[in-house]
Amino acid sequence: MPSGHQDVLHAVVSAIAANDMKALEPFFTEDIELCIRGFAPIDDSWRGRDSVIAAATRNFQKLAQQDPQVETMIEQDDNIVWLLRESGYIKENAQSYEARGVIWWNFEGTQIRRVEQFLHSTLPA
């Protein structure tokens, strides 16, 4: 298992890119929280490892041709914050989107404890 926070995020992003959501389990605390705001197709909150993994699976199934680009990363103590841009398509209606926002990753040891995502997108909220 990766030991550094950046290594954990690299493993998480790699698992998501490979559509291997089961591989996320060891990287999340049992009581992980996920909160996504500002991007209507996936705007919600979830708590608990099983709920968060199920939500991530559903959410990524709604999107296509995602192109996330981390513009800036800040790491301090048990937190990593990304400022990012992303573009892609909503599968349901083939509508393209562009989003810019922040993802705040909070760690407990080497596991992710909380993820807060705040986005501004070209989609109606």
Image (tube, rainbow, N blue to C red):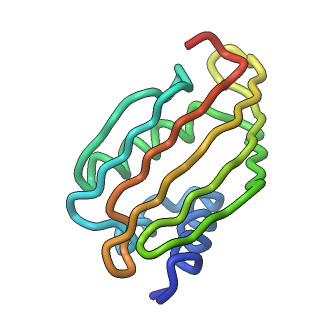
Q: Is residue 39 left or right of residue 93?
A: left
Question: Does residue 119 sit above or below 50 in this rendering?
Answer: above
Residue at position x 78%, y 51% in the image? 69
Considering the image in quadrants, where does the N terminus appear?
Answer: bottom left
Picture quadrant of residue 22: bottom left
Residue at position x 66%, y 16% in the image? 123
Q: In the image shown, does 107 or 54 lie closer to the viewer?
A: 107
Q: In the image shown, does 39 or 17 lie closer to the viewer?
A: 39
Q: In the image shown, does 71 or 19 lie closer to the viewer?
A: 71
Question: Does residue 108 sit above or below 33 in this rendering?
Answer: below
Residue at position x 74%, y 40% in the image? 86
Question: Does residue 29 sit above or below 96 in this rendering?
Answer: below
Counting from the top left corner in percent of width and height, residue 95 is at: 74, 17
Picture quadrant of residue 110: bottom left
Counting from the top left corner in percent of width and height, residue 43 is at: 45, 27
Considering the image in quadrants, where does the C terminus appear?
Answer: top right
Counting from the top left corner in percent of width and height, residue 58 is at: 46, 37
Q: In the image shown, does 68 or 56 lie closer to the viewer?
A: 68
Q: Is residue 96 left or right of residue 91?
A: right
Residue at position x 51%, y 77% in the image? 5
Q: Looking at this view, name the residue that lies furthest to the front.
A: 76
Counting from the top left corner in percent of width and height, residue 90 is at: 67, 24
Question: Does residue 82 sit above or below 29 in this rendering?
Answer: above
